[in-house]
Image (cartoon, rainbow, N blue to C red):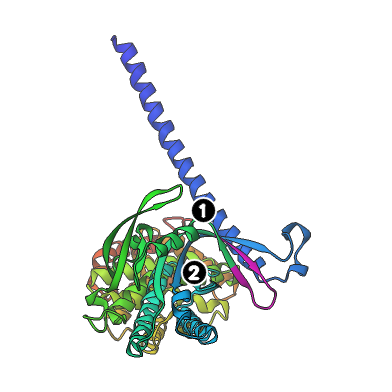
Amino acid sequence: MDKHKEEQLLYRISELIKENKELTKQLKELSNEKNRLNKEHEKLENIIAQIAPEQLPQELKLHGNQRALRFEMATVLYADLQGIKRIAREDSSFDMMDELDNIFLQFNNIVKKYKIEKIKTIGDAYMCAGGVPEKNITNPIDVVLAALEMQDYMNHLKEKYESQDRQFWDFRIGIHTGPVTANYYGRKKLSYDLKGETVHIATRIASASDFCEINVSIMTYEMIKQYFKCDYNGKIPVKYKGNMEILRVKKIKPAYAVNRRLGKEPNQIFMIKYLLRQFTDLQENILDRLEKELPSFLYYHNVKHTIDVINQAELIGYGEGVDDEAILLLKTAALFHDAGHIIGYDNHEFYGTQLAKEYLPQFQYNQQQIDRICDLIMSTQIPPNPNDLLEKIMCDADLDYLGRSDFIPVSNTLYEELKEQDKIGDLNQWNQMQLKFISGHQYFTQTALSLREVNKQKQIERIKSLINGKEHPER
């Protein structure tokens, strides 16, 4: 090949590589936009679900009073109780049905405890689902915890029956995680009916289980395996899916159980890991509210700043070697530390603690954790004066931008925010104030010092240049 053709080929290859990179970028952007639109669609459907049918516009009405929602990740539990004919030979039908009602009543109490939605009872079968109607990332864990309580209750009831030499129900549970369509009915209180292959697979797993077993699909297992001890239990044929692996749930893993041998009740370590996973739901909830309710003049104290502080709190926390609970407390405090701006600008830290006290009990934070989070939020007041390591991490995360290369444009957003509220004079006055503040500022943790201190000193020199008129501010 002559040199000219070789150069042409290389040029063409180079152009194809560039085109491929551009197409990959566009594909990623389209995928992100699709995910965003799907989330918006689900939010709108959940809003519509709370509206009485007669108040809906005609184009949103379905046949009769039935409406439908789509959930991409729900966990369906199907509990199958068998043995009506066998038990009926010994007990009257009324006694038998009373006993079945009592069992289902206990199941209702259990699913309510774990914020799972009871779907329906079908004769002697019981169905419930996590992640419906409120989406949450922890629903596979919640459903398995509920299943273990159901199993424990039924085992105790079985012992009671056997002590009286009476026949007992055959009881088995199947669990599967996947997408579902939820048809919903009613006005004041909505009721749900699930459709889709996720329901079919859960019932299929239950029918393939032995007495008093809890079996889960491989999909559910992948989401719970960190927390629960499970044994491989073979494969079952599933229509249109071929053979599907199932696993038998034995108990909570010893390291995460109050009683390591029994493995029935989660301990504090379990709950910390659970709350860390659940933080995704809490964060989405709060950030969504901030996007809707923060004043428009908050150019600095906005959602982006909150996300920055959450990320830096986690980064510095790991750099300082703190444990998982400390990371949870730091990230949660970072999420709420500026949320109080939706109530008021001044004293927003205090208002942030009030919001934390409102939300966190709903997400199973205990009172000691809530109090600690409130202390961390208040530690971000200016000037920073932290009392311990976690407060030092929190303060360094909040003022991380002082040592970043984008300090000038970020600080200018704070200037614009204050200027719009008539809290500051001209830009030169602002730069002088910034110079005084940043010169007197200190990073408290070794991690922040190593990451930001050198660049912070460079920013001091840049501000001096701005004040002396040697450099124009970045806009």
- In the picture, measured across the screen, residue 41 lies left or right of residue 167, that is right
Crowding at mark 2 (Cα within 10 Å: few <14, some 14-19, many 20+): many
Q: Where is the N terminus found, in terms of image quarters? A: top left
Q: Amino acid at mark 2?
A: Ala
Q: Rounded to the nearest whole Å, what is the CA distance between mark 1 and mark 2?
A: 23 Å
Q: Tell me residue 311's x, y (percent).
A: 37, 66
Viewer-side residue, 162 vs 396 = 162
Residue at x-position 44% and y-position 76%: 86
Task: Work out whether mark 1 precedes mark 2 in sequence or the reverse, and give the earlier one.
Answer: 1
Q: Which residues are magenta?
A: 181-192
Decide: marks 1, 2 in contact (CB < 8 A)?
no
Q: Which mark is residue 129?
A: 2
List the residue tagged with mark 1: 35
Q: Secondary structure beneath disc 1?
A: helix
Viewer-side residue, 374 vs 440 = 374
Viewer-side residue, 36 vs 179 = 179
The answer to whether residue 203 of the structure is visible from this angle is yes
**On screen, residue 254 above or below 240:** below
- In the picture, measured across the screen, residue 342 lies left or right of residue 162, that is right
Crowding at mark 1 (Cα within 10 Å: few <14, some 14-19, many 20+): few
The answer to whether residue 468 of the structure is visible from this angle is no
Farthest front residue in view? 89
Q: Which mark is residue 398?
A: none
Q: Amino acid at mark 1?
A: Asn
Q: Tell me residue 332's x, y (percent).
A: 40, 76
Residue at x-position 45% and y-position 73%: 81
User: Is residue 100 part of the magenta span, yes or no?
Assistant: no
Q: Secondary structure beneath disc 2?
A: strand
Q: How many marks?
A: 2
Q: Nearer the viewer, mark 1 or mark 2?
A: 2
User: Is residue 190 part of the magenta span, yes or no?
Assistant: yes
